[in-house]
């Protein structure tokens, strides 16, 4: 186990800095993690994340976007948050895809666009993200960016629940109150087909 993995951040920093100063992208990212999680120095973390992000590291791009999103170590800037989330999301980073969905849903850093929100949530959902899956359930339940559909809402709540979304059972029970037994059975079958197909057959 390395000093970094063991949480010995002072030793880890001494090991990582020479590599990072030579441009090693993983070391750059891990120096950022060390400053953020080990020392709580968000400004220094943002500096190192930016160096890794500029080399195309998706995890660093996501973390830098999160820092702009929350004003940690940098001034809060939703436009910059979207910029970095998008770079990471286009590389398939699931957290960035979900966060980009949030930005489009709320109109933060971009004009509100529920169709784009659905698109990015769906990309994250296809990678098994339970937060994205449950959010798709909410949007189908409320008719946000899609036609209101309790069957699809139940389906996504069930899938998110299977993947560990806390409170998924409560969401599923809530929508079930407004559904027929036949509709619940259909939603359960759809959830099964979606999961068993590796998210290929989810009635997108």
Image: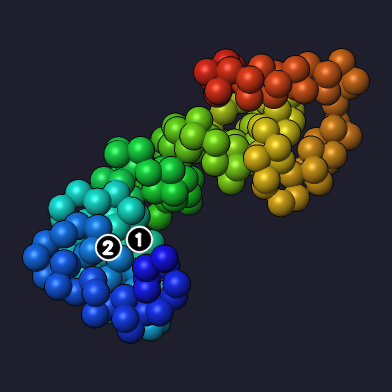
Residue 186 visible in the displayed image: yes
Task: Give the farthest residue toward the left.
Answer: 22
The x and y percentages for residue 72 are 37, 74
The x and y percentages for residue 134 are 64, 41
Q: Is residue 123 left or right of residue 173?
A: left
Sequence-wise, which precedes: disc 2 or disc 1? 2
Mark closer to the observer (2, 1): 2
In the rendered image, the vertical position of residue 121 relative to residue 88, given as above or below: above
Residue at image coords 74%, 44%? 168
Q: Where residue 29 is drawn, which disc sits there?
A: 2
Give the quadrant of the N terminus: bottom left
Instruction: Count how many numbered circles sit on residues in the image.
Output: 2
Q: Is residue 54 left or right of residue 137?
A: left
Give the quadrant of the C terminus: top right
Disc 2 crowd, CA 10 A, few/some/many (<14, 14-19, 20+): many
Q: Where residue 144 is drawn, which disc sits there?
A: none
Residue 68 visible in the displayed image: no
Q: Where residue 63 is drawn, which disc sits there?
A: 1
Residue at image coords 38%, 83%? 39
Query: Do tag 2 and tag 1 residues touch (Cβ < 8 Å)?
Result: yes
Residue at image coords 70%, 37%? 162
Q: Rounded to the nearest whole Å, what is the CA distance between mark 2 and mark 1?
A: 9 Å
Residue nearest the observer in this picture, 130 or 81: 130
In the rendered image, the vertical position of residue 128 relative to residue 3, given as above or below: above
Q: Is residue 156 left or right of residue 183?
A: left
């Amino acid at each position: 186990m390395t000093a970094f993995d063991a949480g010995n951040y002072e030793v880890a920093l001494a090991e990582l800095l020479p590599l990072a100063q030579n441009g090693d992208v993983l070391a750059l990212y891990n120096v950022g993690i060390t400053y953020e999680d080990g020392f709580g120095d968000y400004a220094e973390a943002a500096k190192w994340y930016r160096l890794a992000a500029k080399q195309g590291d998706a995890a660093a791009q996501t973390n830098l976007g999160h820092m702009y999103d929350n004003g940690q170590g940098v001034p809060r800037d939703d436009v910059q948050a979207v910029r970095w989330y998008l770079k990471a999301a286009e590389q398939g980073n699931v957290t960035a895809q979900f966060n980009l969905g949030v930005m489009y849903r709320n109109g933060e850093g971009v004009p509100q666009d529920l169709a784009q929100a659905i698109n990015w949530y769906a990309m994250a959902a296809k990678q098994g993200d339970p937060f994205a899956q449950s959010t798709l359930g909410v949007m189908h339940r409320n008719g946000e960016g899609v036609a209101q559909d309790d069957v699809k809402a139940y389906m996504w709540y069930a899938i998110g629940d299977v993947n560990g979304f806390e409170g998924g059972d409560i969401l599923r029970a809530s929508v079930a109150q407004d559904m027929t037994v036949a509709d619940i059975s259909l939603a359960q079958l759809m959830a099964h087909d979606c999961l068993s197909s590796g998210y290929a057959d989810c009635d997108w």
